[in-house]
Image (cartoon, rainbow, N blue to C red):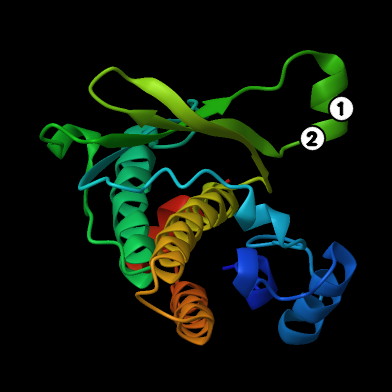
């Protein structure tokens, strides 16, 4: 498994409780805490989470779905099953770490979800993209509100040449939305006088630490997801 970067606390403080860091300072703080700041879970600026959509607010049931491209010589059905199962598990772990009480299932198991988190893998479009991107995997992550299916948020994904790396990138994006949701809820509590600024900051620190402790690939799925 490739190295996983950690989410700096500087990336999740908001409003009156925000840490007084510029983007560069937040980046430097992250480097000191997490080493070389490249790869997955890379949140270099405070705006990364502050500007993320709090798509999980008010959501009780989430379904995850993926649409992966076929690859010669691979057991695509087994890879997609492992991807979906691990996807649901990792999203559930992430929401739990952010103290969001939300049920998570795969799309096949879903019963009237409030939100569908969907990943669609894309191929390389033309010679130039194939030349510049090489074997990197591409796709889009969508957050659909249900039952209408409207897209509440979306993000482009790129990763190294295996499903494991792609999955780490996807989950990093899910984590920003989960933390943004929790931060918005805590900010509302602070504004209502239910908690003070110190409690707000301490709780967000705990959520960031809990998210960073998650190993987003289950050992039983790693052989399938790490395959080229």
Q: Residues within 10 Å of mark 1 (few under 14, many from 20)?
A: few
Residue 207 sits in which quadrant? bottom left
- Look at 42% across and 61% down and name the residue there: 188
Tag of residue 200: none
In this rendering, the count of numbered labels is 2
- Look at 23% across and 55% down and name the residue there: 102
Horizontal side of 172 relative to 19 (left or right) equals left
Q: Is residue 72 visible?
A: no
- Look at 52% across and 43% down and name the residue there: 53
Tag of residue 131: 1
Q: Is residue 147 visible?
A: yes
- Confirm or deny contact between disc 1 and disc 2 (CB under 8 A): yes
Quadrant in the picture for the C terminus = top right
- Residue 48, image x, y percentages: 68, 54
For residue 89, above or below residue 65: below
Q: Which structural element holds mark 2?
A: loop
Q: Residue furthest left?
A: 111
Q: Residue furthest top?
A: 126
Q: In the rendered image, which residue does mark 2 sit on?
A: 134
- Residue 1, image x, y percentages: 56, 68
- Residue 131, image x, y percentages: 86, 27
For residue 205, above or below residue 114: below
- Look at 51% across and 75% down and name the residue there: 208
Q: Residues within 10 Å of mark 2 (few under 14, many from 20)?
A: few
**The one of 176 and 93 positioned closer to us in this rendering:** 176
**The one of 2 and 174 positioned closer to us in this rendering:** 174
- Residue 32, image x, y percentages: 80, 85
Q: Which structural element holds mark 1?
A: helix
Q: CA distance from mark 1 to mark 2?
A: 6 Å
């Amino acid at each position: 498994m490739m190295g996983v970067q950690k989410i700096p606390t500087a990336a999740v403080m908001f409003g009156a409780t925000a840490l007084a860091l510029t983007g560069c300072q937040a980046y430097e703080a992250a480097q000191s805490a997490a080493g070389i700041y490249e790869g997955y879970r890379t949140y270099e600026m405070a705006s990364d989470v502050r500007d993320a959509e709090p798509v999980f607010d008010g959501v009780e049931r989430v379904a995850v779905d993926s649409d992966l491209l076929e690859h010669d010589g691979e057991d695509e059905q087994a890879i997609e099953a492992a991807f979906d199962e691990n996807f649901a598990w990792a999203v559930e772990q992430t929401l739990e770490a952010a103290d969001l009480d939300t049920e998570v299932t795969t799309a096949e198991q879903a019963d009237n979800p409030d939100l569908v988190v969907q990943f669609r893998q894309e191929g390389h479009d033309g010679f130039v993209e194939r030349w510049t991107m090489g074997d990197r995997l591409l796709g889009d992550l969508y957050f659909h509100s249900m039952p209408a299916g409207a897209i509440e948020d979306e993000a482009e994904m790129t990763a190294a040449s295996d499903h494991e790396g792609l999955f780490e990138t996807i989950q990093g994006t899910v984590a920003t939305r989960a933390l943004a949701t929790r931060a918005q809820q805590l900010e509302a509590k602070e504004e209502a006088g239910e908690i003070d600024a110190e409690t707000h900051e301490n709780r967000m620190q705990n959520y960031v630490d809990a998210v960073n402790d998650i190993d987003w690939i289950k050992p039983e799925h790693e052989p399938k997801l790490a395959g080229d």
